[in-house]
Amino acid sequence: MSYEGVPMKESGEEKRASGEGFVISRTKAIVLVVIVILLIIFVGVMSGVLSARKARKDALAEMTTEKPVRATGQGPTSEVKPTEEPTGPEPWYQIRLPQNIRPIHYDLYLNPSLEKNTFDGKVKVLVEVTKESEYMSYMLIHINDMNVTSAKVHKRDPNAEPHAAAPGEEIPSETFEYPKNDYFVFELKKDLEAGGLYVLVMDYKSTFSSQLNGLYISTYTNEKGEQR
């Protein structure tokens, strides 16, 4: 018996291989749509976060009436170190703070202005130099979106109560910022002493954050439907 001339039915795989059409399952189509939606949401959220951060930085820049310059010791302002600088042995190039300086106590004052969306403050930080290091002529502290208007380093008052952030003799210093690692740097004219206690005194101002970090403004609706 001859089978010549008898048409044979092609399977689904053969039809797809022959290029007659593209077939995708319903499950795969749903997964693809979900992925596209998630990508759109992610891009939208990131755009909002970056826009809010830029707006806050612009607002902070407007608060500064003078270009920052290197501190003189009379009323320290700060000089911004260029972010394109190469790495080096200095502590501000390192991601982590020096491990031989340990904060013990903070005295913090904040003065918010809700109408202007700004605040200013002052902090005194009691620190202990636990041991010798190669960075004994520097002190570093983290800042983010802050305009530091005054910054000084003191020896702790020897007559102060235990753990009190009481400044004594001032140690002359120059200051600058290194924004790449969010550092504010004190460059001291006199080396720190191992085992010594020191007090950092800083005045600053900034704007409220629009995100849930730092000092931010939050609202809620009460039972009467009023926003507070």
Image (cartoon, rainbow, N blue to C red):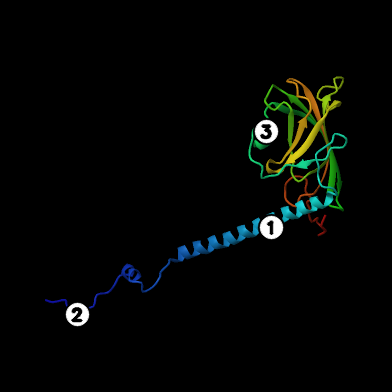
Q: Residue at x 75, y 55 (%)?
A: 55
Which of the two labelled residues, at mark 1 and mark 2, occupies the earlier sequence position? 2
| Residue 225: mark in rendering | none
The residue that label 1 is drawn on is 48
x and y percentages locating residue 11 in the rendered image: 30, 70
- Specify whether residue 16 is in view: yes
As helix, strand or loop, the secondary structure at mark 2 comes to: loop
Image quarter hosting the C terminus: bottom right
Taking 178 as reference, is 27 above or below it?
A: below
First along the sequence among labels 2 and 3:
2
Q: Position of residue 22 (x, y in %)?
A: 40, 70
Can residue 108 be spotted in the picture?
Answer: no
Label 1 neighbour load within 10 Å: few <14, some 14-19, many 20+:
few
For marks 1 and 2, give the one nearer the viewer: 1
What residue would you read off at disc 3? 90
- Depth check, front residue: 183 or 45: 183
Query: Are the residues flagged by discs 1 and 2 in contact, CB closer than 8 Å?
Result: no
Q: Badge 3: few (under 14), some or many (20 or more) residues near its Cα, within 10 Å?
A: few
Residue 207 in the image: above or below residue 167: below
Q: CA distance from mark 2 to mark 3?
A: 86 Å
Residue 182, x across and y down, in percent: 71, 41
Marks 3 and 1, the one that precedes in the sequence: 1
Most foreground residue, 138 or 42: 138
Q: Which residue is mark 2?
A: 5
Q: 85 left or right of 161?
A: left
Q: Amino acid at mark 3?
A: Glu
State how far apart marks 1 and 2 are (Cα): 67 Å
